[in-house]
Amino acid sequence: MSTLAGCVQIDTPDKPIEINLNINIRQEVVYRLDGDAKKLIEQNSEIF
């Protein structure tokens, strides 16, 4: 059996690697209250 020896060459790039991340995060919170819950909150507004 013969052994194969190889050579690996890696060249560094001339320019720096640039990574652009454009991320938009949007969060919406929607809540609906029925009439009784809304009245209860209005009557006890100091709790909230």
Image (cartoon, grey):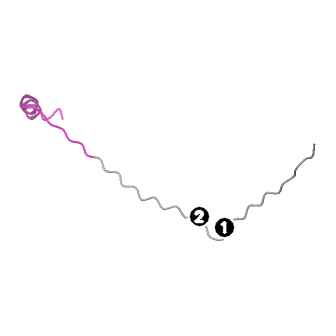
Labelled pair 2, 1 in contact (Cβ < 8 Å): yes
* 46 part of magenta stretch: yes
Q: Is residue 25 left or right of residue 47?
A: right
Viewport quadrant of the N terminus: top right
Residue under label 2: 17
* 29 part of magenta stretch: yes
Where residue 10 appears, as percent x and y from the top left, is: 74, 61
Please, what secondary structure does the residue beneath circle 1 have? loop
State the CA–CA distance, disc 2 to disc 1.
Answer: 8 Å
Where residue 16 appears, as percent x and y from the top left, is: 61, 67
Residue under label 1: 13
Instruction: Tell me the amino acid under the disc marked 1.
Output: Pro
The residue sitting at 25% across, 46% down in the picture is 28
Viewport quadrant of the C terminus: top left
Disc 2 crowd, CA 10 A, few/some/many (<14, 14-19, 20+): few
Where residue 12 appears, as percent x and y from the top left, is: 70, 65
Q: Is residue 19 left or right of residue 5?
A: left
The residue sitting at 9% across, 33% down in the picture is 38
Where residue 33 appears, as percent x and y from the top left, is: 12, 34
Which residues are the magenta region?
A: 28-48
Q: Is residue 45 left or right of residue 25?
A: left
Please, what secondary structure does the residue beneath circle 2 have? loop
Which residue is more in the foreground, 1 or 32? 1
Q: Which mark is residue 42?
A: none
